[in-house]
Image: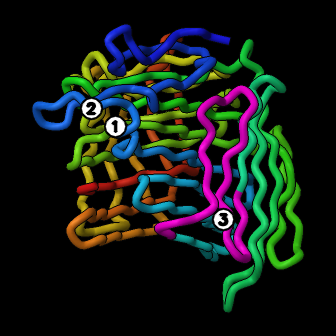
């Protein structure tokens, strides 16, 4: 357990980077500046955006699910894509008030979003070696019922998480904990069960807390699977509002659990042609990838006078080459996600 703190003695969040989980994610206790004023944590917390997002991949299914709390709105979704048939469906909930909680610590704490006919719960339990996911969603019209229980296995001696706090303004930071993990369990769709085995199933965790500026954007890419040599690989690449992404970013490749850091990201894509290929690279020439979208989920939000958001999450295949610290990594058709998001919130 790592006792490093995000908060400094001045009460503000500060940058950090490490490859072990924080014992306490204290960014919610940070002060912040609003205009010329320094405000206490109780007020700054109203600007804190939090989520836990998982992308789960098996030979037959891709599942994305999230609990999001932006304070004036609570959001949850479960998207299921059949990689064999191409069929896709999504259960989505968006509420001003909802039975929602997001864990502060990852050592032994639960997160949930629950409303009538919809329950999504995570158990962050690194004390016991992993994370649990539960879904219990009733059939709704043409949308099938979904029940699932997964265990994401995290041996901290074998798999390094990427844990960073990055400056998004002069006195605010964004915290994230990202890691690809083997997982097992069961996904049941309208009573038909699909077993998941950790030898070929993986979960990508994206846990996030940030005092974002009012105008926020990001482009994000992630995937996990096996490279051409059979090694377990994972990937994360983001271009966002971080002021100095040469020194502070969340760009990394995992090879058999070990992290190699990457330089600032460059995304080349056509936002008006949603399913056109994306080109991904980094300024240190360690990434040369093509992402070929197959489908997408979109979520546009407009709360007059308060917020607006344009969001698209595309799923598809990645191919190309990465440069890890110990040599090249060839990627051939691994499934994953890209996101394009722009908001005023």
Marks 3 and 1: which is nearer the front?
1
Secondary structure beneath label 2: strand
Q: Is residue 325 above or below residue 25?
A: above
Q: Nearer the viewer, residue 286 or 2?
A: 2
The N terminus sits in image quarter: top right
Toward which corner of the image does residue 200 lie, by quadrant? top right
Mark 1 touches mark 2? (CB < 8 Å) = yes
Q: Which residue is mark 2?
A: 39
Q: Residues within 10 Å of mark 2 (few under 14, many from 20)?
A: some
Toward which corner of the image does residue 147 lie, by quadrant? bottom right
In this image, 28 relative to 132: left or right? left
- The Cα–Cα distance between marks 2 and 3, rounded to whole angstroms, is 48 Å
Residue 286 visible (yes or no)? no
In this image, 137 relative to 46: left or right? right
Boundaries of the magenta span: 95-120
Which residue corresponds to the image point at 62% horizontal and 76% vertical from the top-left? 89
Q: Mark 1 or mark 3, which is nearer the start of the sequence? A: 1
Toward which corner of the image does residue 48 lie, by quadrant? top left
Instruction: Please say whether residue 122 is one of the residues in the magenta stretch.
Output: no
The residue most toward the left is: 36
Residue 243 visible (yes or no)? yes
Secondary structure beneath label 3: loop
Q: Residues within 10 Å of mark 1 (few under 14, many from 20)?
A: some
Q: Nearer the viewer, residue 325 or 75?
A: 75
The C terminus sits in image quarter: bottom left
Which residue corresponds to the image point at 46% horizontal and 32% vertical from the top-left? 28
Q: Which residue is mark 1?
A: 44
**Residue 83 tag number:** 3
Instruction: Please say whether residue 107 is one of the residues in the magenta stretch.
Output: yes
Which residue corresponds to the image point at 44% horizontal and 62% vertical from the top-left? 73
Q: Is residue 325 above or below residue 173?
A: above
């Amino acid at each position: 357990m790592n006792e490093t703190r995000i908060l400094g003695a001045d009460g503000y969040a500060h940058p950090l980077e490490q490859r072990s989980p924080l014992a306490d994610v204290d960014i919610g206790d940070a002060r912040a500046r609003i205009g010329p004023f320094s405000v206490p944590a109780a007020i700054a917390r109203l600007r804190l955006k939090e989520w836990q997002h998982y992308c789960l991949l098996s030979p037959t299914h891709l599942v994305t699910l999230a609990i999001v709390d932006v304070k004036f709105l609570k959001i949850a979704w479960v998207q299921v894509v059949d990689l064999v048939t191409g069929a896709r469906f999504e259960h989505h909930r968006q509420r001003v008030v909802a039975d929602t909680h997001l864990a502060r610590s990852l050592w032994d704490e639960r997160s949930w979003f629950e409303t009538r006919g919809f329950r999504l719960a995570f158990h962050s339990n690194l004390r016991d070696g992993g994370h649990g996911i539960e879904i219990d969603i009733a059939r709704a019209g043409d949308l099938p019922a979904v029940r699932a229980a997964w265990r994401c296995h995290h041996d901290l001696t074998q798999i390094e998480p990427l844990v960073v706090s990055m400056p998004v303004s002069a006195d605010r930071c964004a915290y994230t904990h990202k890691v690809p993990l083997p997982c097992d369990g069961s996904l049941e769709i309208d009573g038909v069960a699909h077993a998941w085995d950790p030898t070929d199933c993986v979960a990508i965790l994206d846990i996030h807390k940030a005092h974002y500026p009012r105008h926020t954007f990001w482009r994000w890419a992630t995937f996990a699977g096996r490279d051409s040599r059979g090694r377990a690989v994972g990937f994360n690449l983001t271009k966002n509002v971080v002021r100095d992404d040469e020194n502070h970013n969340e760009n990394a490749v995992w090879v058999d659990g070990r992290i190699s850091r990457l330089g600032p990201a460059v995304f080349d894509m056509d936002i008006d042609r949603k399913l056109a290929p994306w080109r991904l690279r980094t300024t240190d020439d360690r990434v040369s990838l093509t992402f070929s979208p197959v489908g997408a989920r979109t979520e546009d939000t407009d709360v007059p006078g308060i917020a607006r958001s344009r969001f698209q999450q595309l799923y598809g295949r990645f191919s190309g080459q990465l440069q890890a610290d110990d040599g090249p990594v060839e990627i051939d058709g691994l499934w994953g996600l890209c996101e394009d998001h722009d908001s005023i919130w």
